[in-house]
Image (cartoon, grey):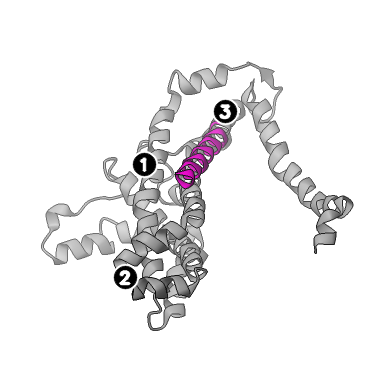
Amino acid sequence: MNKVLSNKKAIVFFLFPATILCFFIIIVPIIMSTTYSLSEWDGIGKKVFVGLSNYKELFLYNKDGFWKSVINSLIFAVGSVFMQLPISMILALFLARGVKRERFYVSVYFIPVLISTVVIGQLWMKIYNPQYGLLNTLLKSFGLDSLTNNWLGNPSTVVFSVIIPVLWQYIGYHMLLMYASIKSIPGDIFEAARIDGANGFQTAIRITIPLMKPILKVCVIFAVVGSLKNFDLVYVMTGGGPGGASQLPSTLMVETIFHRNMYGYGSSMAMFIILECFIFAFVIRKAFREKEQL
């Protein structure tokens, strides 16, 4: 193995296909989006170079409620970090203790990740339906008729109504990553903690979670970046409505490019999403690195 790794020709040979694939799937589209964002183009006619005009409209004039969509994506990110990840961690800590039918529960919690996003969107649309939906039906059965709502049709509730299925879908994904991380910790450490008189809570806070920092960093990055570029579930459930209340930069971008044929302006949104994800990923990595140095 060491002989292969020391052979630079072998390294280049094995990395070349992946490099070519990455170039044409990632680098080329980013370059194309950059050129489109500096132009005015309807997708058919001639592209007209306009410089930074698209970015000026995007950031300064708040055209089409762009900053509202950015705030919504940040709400998704906060919900992912402070709601989704803690629930995932609690489930992982509980299951990793060796409960009965442990593998069965791990599989059950992971099922939503495997279900198509379109199916999940349709499922939760039925749950939120104001006439026959499960949520309103339960509220009425408990005598809480005043709390019933048109959850996806009310601008004041639609964002939080859409966040819940997004968080629910990927709780099992992060749980599985954390569960695998806990299982990789040597059992001798936990045995020593029990001998020293540490209870389950103390062991989790002082031993398990600190040793999970590498995978926690990955989960935070995945959760935040995934929230910032979230598209499919919101598009299926609300399409960004009502009145743009649940609009995200990604849904606004698709609407701008494919519905209004504004490829240049829509591409500037795409570049913003890319840059935003890179910045947040960098900040999170740096924050974890500083904590590890402390």
- The reply, left or right, for residue 131 in relation to residue 214 is left
Tell me where residue 94 appears, x and y as whole percent: 36, 71
Q: What residue type is disc 3 on?
A: Ser
Our reading of the magenta stretch's main secondary structure is helix
Secondary structure of residue under mark 1: helix
**Dot 1 amino acid type:** Ile
- Report the side of 18 relative to 256 (left or right): right
The residue sitting at the left extreme is: 143
* Residue identified by numbered label 2: 200
Q: Quadrant of the C terminus?
A: top left
Q: Residues within 10 Å of mark 3 (few under 14, many from 20)?
A: many
Say which mark, if any, is on residue 175: none
Q: Is residue 159 above or below residue 66?
A: below
Mark 2 or mark 3, earlier in chain:
2
Q: Residues within 10 Å of mark 2 (few under 14, many from 20)?
A: some
Q: Secondary structure at mark 3?
A: helix
Q: Is residue 257 visible?
A: yes
| Left/right of residue 36 with respect to residue 13 in the rendered view | left
The residue under label 3 is 268
Question: Alpha-carbon distance for marks 2 and 3?
Answer: 50 Å
* Helix, strand or loop for disc 2: helix
Name the residue at the front extreme: 196
* Total number of numbered discs in the rendering: 3
Residue 87 in view, yes or no: no
Tag 1 residue? 75
Give the camera-side residue of 42 and 216.
216
Residue at the image point whose x is 41% and y is 59% from the top: 209
